[in-house]
Image (cartoon, rainbow, N blue to C red):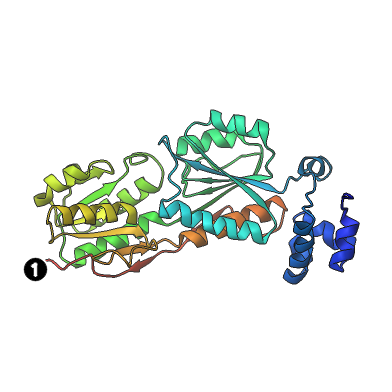
Amino acid sequence: MKKITIKDIAKEAGVSVATVSNVLNRKPNKATAHTIEKIYEVVNKYDYSSNLNARSLVTSKSGMIGILYYTEKEEVKFSDPFLSDVLTGIEYVSKKNGIFILVHGFSDVSDIRNLQQNWKFDGYAVIGATERIHDELCKLIKAPIVFVDTYSENQGNLEYPRIYVHNDDFELSKLATTYLLAKGHQKIAIFSPTLGKDSVGVINERFTGFKKVFEENNLTWSEELFFDENEIEALISKQDAYTAVLANSDLLAGRLLRAWKEHHILNKSVISFDNSFFADLVDPRLSTIDLFQREKGRLAVQALIDCIHKKPDVKAKYVIKGELIERNSVKKVR
């Protein structure tokens, strides 16, 4: 079969060669959605693929973004609702802009060095990096980066753009804690990963916000009521020490609800973060803070793409608002 060219694609799709070139070179804003669809119908029909490496030598753009997810665990759990929701938002906007993405989990920065040797990315979206990992990546990666759910005090004087997208976790934790206090709970346990608890980051922001509410209400709180994500058995054995739990995610809250049921513990309350798809399906239905994770993913990758194309008005930081979703997992203390 004769090798198809861009001219052939343009002729069959009924558009100009320039339009086909724009679409294949990730400039979909120069064509309508209907035109883009027609072009890709022809591309798929003939299994046409442009040589990305050759094109990158000419344009210095590969049309690819690396999605880096930081975890200290051996295995990345893509079933985690937080990660799947953020990736859903990222994939939606990437596809809309004609960008390819590669998702890569890592636990050590040396892994990223190997990645850069084998792939060329126009930019990176980094999810969940600690401050230490953030600082190392900023030195290592010579391309724009958008950090999702990373707080850092070292953001200035960088050669390449760094963008930050996260919630106001301090204020949202205050909101959740205040809600528990309003329901009469003063003995509150925290169920959360320990990673980042004592350094700049999401866990620390939420923990600090929680303690701030206790301070503002002249209440005392014991560190003995902080339970790591792996200490669910301790949460069960020390059930008399608390009336409610602030869980760091819906996933942890769901695990806790199941454990309570297995041990016939029916008088406890829990509130969490995320508003995952199952939050309204568990029993009791989960009260939670909606973090709009899909919107976070969409905003993050759009800001990165705009930054790569040097569009104006790209901010250094975007703060996603959250919302308290009240269901029935928090009972009133009698």
Q: Is residue 62 above or below residue 88?
A: above
Q: Locate residue 226: give its quadrant.
A: top left
Q: Is residue 15 above or below residue 166?
A: below
Whether residue 205 sits left or right of residue 44 in the image: it is left
Residue ID at (46%, 59%): 293
Image spot of residue 27 (x, y percent): 76, 58
Image spot of residue 188 (x, y percent): 19, 54
Q: Locate residue 180: give its quadrant.
A: bottom left
Whether residue 167 sits left or right of residue 119 in the image: it is left
Residue labelled with disc 1: 334
Image spot of residue 257 (x, y percent): 23, 56
Image spot of residue 205 (x, y percent): 36, 49
Q: Locate residue 157: give its quadrant.
A: top right
Q: Is residue 237 above or below residue 173?
A: above
Whether residue 257 sits left or right of residue 194 in the image: it is left
Residue ID at (78%, 55%): 24
